[in-house]
Image (spheres, rainbow, N blue to C red):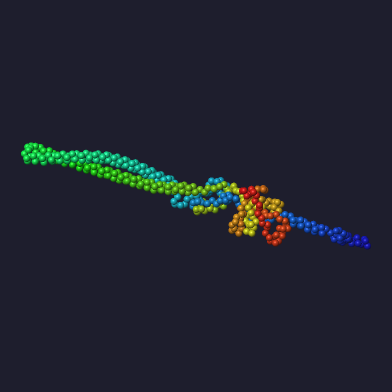
């Protein structure tokens, strides 16, 4: 029987101990051990710390506006005649990018600046001529005033002489009148005495002659006094004439001075206008060459080839600065804005750089970089979110040097540390993260 059983076992491959090996009926079960072990591990895990965070995405930017991509705009309308660089080239500040040719009729003259300078010279010569004329006329006015004063002084002296002569002639006339009175009395007496036969005829004739002589002398002295008085009046009239004539000449000269000054002012206005035009022409001529405003790389050329027309203020290309202070702009949902504060730490993941992230355990993450919030904008952007600016943190390694402007970034704003069970309970109930503000130190307050 035993041989038969052994023969059957060999032919069928049946092992009589197989049920015991399969069901392990003779061994103790360890399911309870593993169940409680896992349960205890989960319980311990629930009390581990978890860092709450909010997620946000954004791009790499710069902290200062002048370090962001700059548009190279034309100041004047024109025609492209030469490209000095090509897209992708690195340029230095002051390098020529594009050369333009003016297309307006007012600026097509190649000798426009020289001709304007000649106009300025002619205006300046005209001003110099009128200024010399003003000086000469002023000297003429001084000479006329001096001549007038000299003539009036001479006439005043003559007038004084005539006044004294009038006094002298008046005295002589009085003496002549006295002599005439005496001669008249003597003549009357002589006529009476002749009638009485007291004197001879010759004596009467002598006294008659004496009377006639005194009468003629009185008449002469009277005419002399009248002539002197007439000369006095004529001298006064001459003084008025000299003064009037000199004043007329002086007024005419001053009128010429005023006219010359008016021409100087008018020509000076034209000179200033031409000077302004010349400066505009010179500056406009320099605007035909578009210059790189700073060191950077030329990108995104909007115009192609030569002889292409550009409008005033049109963008031709962009320059991306080489020297930049990198920052990150993240866009936070409105409901999370109150959870973000200035000075708060943020963990960043840059596109193109591998990272292993445990959002709740930032210290265990790999490939993330530390950032610090320096600004939180209060206006809503077009994407319906609020923008925050983040700069590199100082406590850890620097950001990668190969990060480029505009690269994508994901950020995790670190919030309060809580237990895992509390975070699960919060997530299940839909409660917001813990809201708190970092306490400012005395150093921060002073700053």
Q: Which quadrant holds the N terminus?
A: bottom right
Residue appearing at x 61%, y 58% in the figure: 385
Q: With 30 as the anchor, is 307 left or right in this view?
A: left
Q: Position of residue 143 (x, y in %)?
A: 32, 41
Residue appearing at x 71%, y 61% in the figure: 428
Q: Nearer the viewer, residue 236 or 424?
A: 236
Residue at the extreme left: 197
Q: Nearer the viewer, residue 262 or 162?
A: 162
Q: Position of residue 59 (x, y in %)?
A: 62, 54
Residue appearing at x 86%, y 58% in the figure: 27
Q: Position of residue 84 (x, y in %)?
A: 53, 47
Q: Quadrant of residue 197?
A: top left
Q: Position of residue 150 (x, y in %)?
A: 29, 40
Residue 290 at least partly seen: yes
In this figure, what is the number of numbered marks?
A: 0
Q: Nearer the viewer, residue 226 or 391?
A: 226
Residue appearing at x 91%, y 60% in the figure: 6
């Amino acid at each position: 029987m035993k041989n038969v059983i052994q023969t059957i076992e060999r032919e069928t491959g049946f092992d009589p101990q197989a049920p015991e090996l399969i069901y392990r009926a003779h061994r103790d079960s360890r399911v309870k051990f593993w169940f409680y072990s896992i349960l205890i591990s989960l319980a311990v895990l629930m009390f581990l710390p978890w860092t709450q965070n909010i997620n946000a995405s954004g791009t790499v930017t710069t902290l200062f506006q002048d370090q962001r991509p700059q548009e190279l705009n034309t100041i004047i309308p024109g025609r492209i005649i030469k490209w000095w660089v090509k897209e992708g080239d690195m340029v230095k500040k002051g390098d020529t990018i594009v050369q333009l040719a003016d297309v307006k009729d007012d600026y097509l003259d190649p000798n426009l600046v020289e001709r304007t300078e000649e106009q300025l010279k002619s205006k300046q010569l005209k001003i110099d001529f009128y200024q010399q004329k003003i000086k000469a006329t002023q000297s003429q006015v001084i000479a006329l005033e001096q001549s007038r004063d000299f003539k009036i002084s001479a006439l005043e002296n003559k007038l004084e002489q005539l006044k004294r002569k009038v006094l002298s002639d008046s005295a002589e006339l009085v003496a002549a009148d006295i002599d005439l009175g005496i001669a008249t009395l003597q003549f009357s007496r002589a006529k009476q005495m002749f009638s009485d036969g007291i004197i001879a005829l010759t004596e009467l004739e002598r006294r008659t002659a004496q009377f006639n002589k005194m009468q003629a002398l009185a008449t002469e002295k009277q005419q002399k006094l009248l002539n002197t008085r007439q000369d006095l009046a004529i001298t006064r009239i001459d003084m008025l004439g000299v003064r009037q004539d000199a004043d007329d000449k002086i007024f005419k000269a001053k009128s010429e001075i005023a006219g010359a000054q008016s021409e100087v002012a008018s020509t000076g206005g034209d000179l200033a206008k031409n000077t302004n035009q010349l400066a505009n022409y010179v500056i406009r001529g320099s605007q035909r060459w578009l210059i790189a405003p700073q060191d950077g790389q030329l990108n995104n050329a909007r115009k192609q080839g030569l002889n292409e027309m550009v409008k005033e203020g049109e963008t031709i290309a962009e320059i991306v600065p080489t020297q930049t202070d990198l920052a990150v702009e993240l866009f936070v949902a409105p409901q999370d804005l109150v959870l973000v504060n200035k000075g708060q730490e943020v963990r960043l993941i840059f596109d193109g750089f591998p990272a292993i992230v445990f959002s709740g355990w930032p210290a265990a993450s790999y490939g993330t970089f530390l950032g610090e919030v320096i600004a939180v904008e209060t206006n809503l952007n077009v994407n319906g979110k609020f923008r925050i600016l983040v700069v590199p943190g100082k406590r850890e390694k620097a950001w990668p040097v190969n990060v480029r402007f505009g690269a994508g970034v994901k950020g995790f704003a670190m919030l309060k540390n809580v237990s895992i069970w509390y975070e699960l309970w919060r997530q299940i109930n839909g409660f917001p993260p813990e809201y708190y503000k970092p306490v400012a130190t005395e150093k921060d307050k002073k700053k």
